[in-house]
């Protein structure tokens, strides 16, 4: 089973896990992200094994331990951060580049999990597919574990000769506390996903295997294959067999089980070595680091809806680059360390000397809102970063969450989320704006009931189904009620933007409506009849496709979902408001 100091069985397990992660980020495995949980358990096992061995030999040093981990993690993180910053400079719009800049800083400081928790929250949001460094949250969690975990051992080792038993008890208590934190509804899903406290029990599950003595071995091939089969099913099966929480706990349990039975002292199993899978496991760190960068930039530059051959290319290229990185970078660093006594200091010093100016430049890009060039189609100027105000333009509507004045004009209430704020901006840009009292409200509360009572016209707009407003719709239906339909222009604004070298055809780009938006609009048209406003039909041309540029060569949307100021003005010029506001001039 052993090849040198490596366990090829655990390498195969890591190989399966990394394939799950890559396929997840390629949108093929819904639950492939559980491969990360396999890595966390294995990391806990190997970290504990290393610390215990060094303490037994009396040669453990906390600083040397962190130095070794930094040498392994940092160089590749620096490389992909530089590549993401450079490629993003030429291929990304300000919002995307601002996010890349902030994640470069977070990655270089090993806190991208905290950055993602604060800024992104929802790991499963579709926009994450286009972020090249969103996956380094995992490295942040792992390094924070490396900082904290050895302290349990150091403290026990210096206070008692029975330190292993004490550490085992402490870790069991800490693991139980972490598990309870994860399963109890104290914090939100984002907290549990991104932050170490809710992940700590996964590391400890692997670590306790080192501290709890293994039993006498017996042939357990069938148990190994059964456990491996269950892990593959959890990662690769897209059916929602149970809640995501139970899936994660099951993955941790089965991974712990596989490590336990594959490291028995006697009668080790004659499990065959599938070398391709074990090589993927050996290079799993490099593959993990590179694959999201490759997939994200491919989606931003070339195509976001991949066909079978594009999937083969992107996934295959990610694996090849990852394996090459393992042999040419990771292994080269290991050999360099073995040859040169001061190699670790040199590597870390060089990494820090690169990371510091890189982080400073990234922070400067972040402060400039990601604006690094003039973008006429978005009315953005590099000399005035504040002109990148597409999000501000939508958010400004919050200040119109006010009661109706008593001035004799018709009262118009716009209800809903950011899609409702888009509609408010359309009304504000229309020539009817000065003839109406406009009010916006989002919250489902008594204020909304009061505004409904006072309104003459009500526009209900939100992304997705309108069931959220079911209890208010009976009151709304006594007024002139309109349902504003869903809209989506494109998934990747960068993909649209990177066609800018095509000349006039750039401004003639058109898109097809997605099935989910078309079906939802059809369904809601049947419900609301003449009270339904189809937002996609407004930009539909004679060919049946949909415009994404105004006649003045301005983008209708900056993110594929919400309207720019030019987009709101374009909609205002196309919509026949006389059919909506009867008798209003």
Image (cartoon, helix red, strand yellow):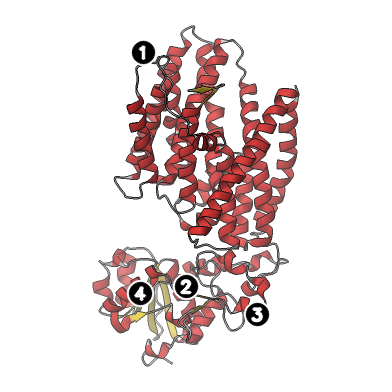
Dot 4 or dot 2: first in sequence order is 2
Q: Is residue 556 above or below residue 131?
A: below
Which of the two marks, 4 or 3, is nearer to us in this view?
3
Secondary structure found at label 2: helix
Q: Is residue 537 above or below residue 149?
A: below
Secondary structure found at label 1: loop
How far separated are the C-alphas under marks 2 and 3?
28 Å
How far separated are the C-alphas under marks 1 and 3?
74 Å
Dot 2 or dot 3: first in sequence order is 2
Secondary structure found at label 4: helix
Res. 187 in view: no
Which of the two marks, 2 or 3, is nearer to us in this view?
3
Q: Which residue is mark 4?
A: 521
Q: Residue at x 56, y 21 (%)?
A: 5
Percent coordinates x, y for residue 424 in the rendering: 45, 75
Dot 2 or dot 1: first in sequence order is 1
Dot 1 or dot 4: first in sequence order is 1
Q: Which residue is mark 2?
A: 422
Which of the two marks, 1 or 3, is nearer to us in this view?
1
Percent coordinates x, y for residue 511 in the rendering: 50, 74
Is there a contact, CB below 8 Å, between mark 2 and mark 3?
no
Q: Residue at x 50, y 61 (%)?
A: 306
Label 2 CA crowd tier, 10 Å (few <14, some 14–19, many 20+): many
Q: Which residue is mark 1?
A: 216
Q: Residue at x 46, y 82 (%)?
A: 540
* Camera-nearest residue between 328 and 366: 328
Q: Which residue is mark 3?
A: 504
Percent coordinates x, y for residue 230 in the rendering: 34, 37
Which of the two marks, 4 or 2, is nearer to us in this view?
4
* Camera-nearest residue between 215 and 160: 215
Q: In the image as oriented, which residue stretches furthest toward the left?
A: 474
């Amino acid at each position: 089973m052993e090849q040198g100091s490596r366990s090829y069985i655990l390498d195969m397990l890591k190989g399966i896990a990394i394939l799950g992660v890559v396929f997840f980020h390629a949108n093929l495995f819904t639950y492939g992200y559980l491969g990360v949980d396999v890595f966390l358990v294995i990391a806990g096992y190997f970290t504990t094994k290393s610390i215990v061995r060094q303490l037994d030999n009396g040669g453990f040093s906390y600083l040397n331990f962190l130095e070794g981990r930094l040498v392994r993690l940092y160089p590749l993180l620096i490389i992909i951060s530089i590549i993401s910053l450079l490629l993003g400079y030429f291929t990304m719009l300000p919002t995307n580049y601002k996010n890349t800049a902030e994640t470069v800083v977070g990655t270089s400081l090993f806190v991208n999990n905290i950055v993602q928790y604060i800024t992104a929250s929802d790991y499963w949001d579709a926009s994450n597919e286009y972020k090249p460094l969103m996956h380094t949250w995992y490295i942040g969690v792992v390094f924070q574990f490396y900082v904290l975990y050895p302290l349990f051992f150091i403290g026990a080792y210096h206070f008692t000769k029975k330190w292993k038993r004490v550490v085992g008890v402490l870790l069991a208590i800490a693991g139980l506390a972490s598990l309870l934190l994860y399963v109890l509804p104290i914090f939100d899903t984002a907290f549990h996903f991104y932050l170490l406290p809710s992940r700590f029990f996964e590391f400890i599950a692997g670590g306790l295997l080192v501290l709890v003595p293994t039993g006498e071995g017996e042939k357990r091939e069938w148990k190994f294959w059964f456990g491996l089969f269950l892990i593959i099913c959890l990662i690769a099966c897209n059916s929602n067999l149970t809640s995501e929480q139970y899936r994660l706990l099951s993955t941790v349990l089965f991974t712990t089980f596989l490590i336990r039975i594959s490291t028995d002292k006697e009668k080790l199993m004659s499990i065959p070595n599938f070398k391709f899978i074990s090589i993927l496991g050996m290079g799993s760190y490099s593959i993990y680091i590179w694959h999201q960068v490759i997939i994200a930039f491919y989606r931003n530059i070339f195509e976001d809806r991949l066909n079978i051959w594009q999937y083969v290319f992107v996934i295959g290229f990610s694996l090849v680059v990852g394996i090459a990185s393992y042999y040419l970078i990771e292994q080269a660093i290991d050999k360099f360390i073995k040859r040169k006594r001061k190699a670790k200091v040199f590597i870390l010093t060089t990494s820090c000397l690169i990371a510091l100016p890189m982080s400073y430049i990234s922070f400067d890009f972040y402060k400039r809102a990601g604006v690094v060039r003039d973008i006429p189609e978005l009315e953005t100027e590099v000399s005035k970063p504040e002109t990148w105000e597409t999000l501000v333009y939508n958010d400004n509507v919050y200040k119109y969450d006010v009661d109706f004045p008593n001035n004799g004009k018709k009262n118009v209430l716009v209800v809903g989320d950011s899609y409702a704020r888009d509609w408010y901006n359309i009304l504000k840009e229309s020539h009817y704006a000065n003839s109406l009292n406009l009010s916006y409200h989002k919250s489902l509360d008594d204020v909304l009931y009061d505004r409904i009572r006072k309104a003459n016209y009500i526009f209900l707009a939100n992304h997705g189904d309108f069931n959220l407003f079911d209890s208010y719709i009976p009151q709304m239906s006594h007024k002139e009620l309109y349902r504003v339909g869903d809209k989506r222009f494109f998934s990747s604004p960068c993909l649209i933007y990177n066609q800018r070298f095509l000349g006039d055809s750039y401004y003639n780009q058109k898109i097809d409506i997605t099935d989910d938006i078309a079906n939802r609009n059809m369904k809601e048209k049947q419900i609301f009849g003449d009270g339904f406003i189809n937002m996609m039909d407004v930009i539909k041309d004679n060919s049946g496709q949909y415009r994404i540029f105004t006649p003045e060569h301005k983008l209708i949307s900056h993110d594929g979902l919400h309207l720019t100021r030019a987009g709101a003005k374009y909609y205002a010029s196309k919509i026949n408001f006389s059919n909506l506001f009867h008798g209003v001039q």
